[in-house]
Amino acid sequence: MNPVVVVQLTQDELLELQTYVDALRDWHHEQGHRDKMPGKTEDELRAYDLKGRAGEYALAKHLGLEYQYSLGYEENRDVHGYEVRTRSKHHYDLFTFDTDRDGIYVLATTTNNRVVMLHGWTTLRETLQPDRHAPWMKRPCYLTPRDQLYPMAFLPSATSHTKNTTPA
């Protein structure tokens, strides 16, 4: 199993993220966007968004980069070129979809948003394997086990990423 990078978020960082999530959710409603998870309450959707943003923030903090807040759907990646998938249980796998953009995907987990664990990374191309397909999901989804991720110590630069990037 890869060594896990543990990132502690401060209360101030969480409050900043909560303010951002609130603004983001409000902007989405103003733009008339539909939620991707129908049937969830607004509080559940805000908690889901906060969890995701906590994972992104933790990666930026780990890399010594400033987290970029933005509203809307932009062409940039979650964190300076990386895609972050944040899960609510530490034993969960990295999930990707066949409609995701090519790139480097990082698995983060958190149960309380204060402590975020970065488990490793891989490329989208490596995740889209037939043996990783999860047919029970509502849309085509692939689950990559944590033990098949590359260690965070070997995370390549997202700007120099090529489709065949793997650690030496």
Image: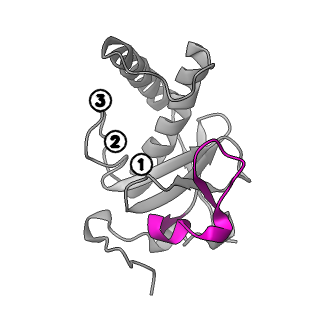
Identified at 51% across, 65% down, the residue is: 121
What range is drawn magenta here? Answer: 121-143
Secondary structure, mark 3, is: loop
Q: Amino acid at mark 3?
A: Gly
Instruction: Say which amino acid is labelled 1.
Output: Lys
The answer to whether mark 1 and mark 2 are in CB contact below 8 A is yes
Give residue 72's mark.
Answer: 3
User: How far across and down, in percent of the image, does residue 89 sit?
Assistant: 71, 45
Residue type (three-letter) at the residue carrying disc 2: Tyr
The first of marks 3 and 2 along the sequence is 2
Would you identify the image quadrant in which residue 145 lies? bottom right
Q: Position of residue 75 (x, y in %)?
A: 25, 45
Circle 1 packing at 10 Å, graded few (<14), some (14-19), many (20+), is some
**Considering only vertical position in the picture, is 122 above or below 27?**
below
Answer whether residue 141 is magenta in the image: yes
Where 125 falls versus 34 (above or below)? below
Marks 3/1: CA distance? 22 Å
List the residue tagged with mark 2.
Answer: 67
Q: Does residue 68 appear in the picture of this structure?
A: yes
* Residue at which label 1 appears: 61
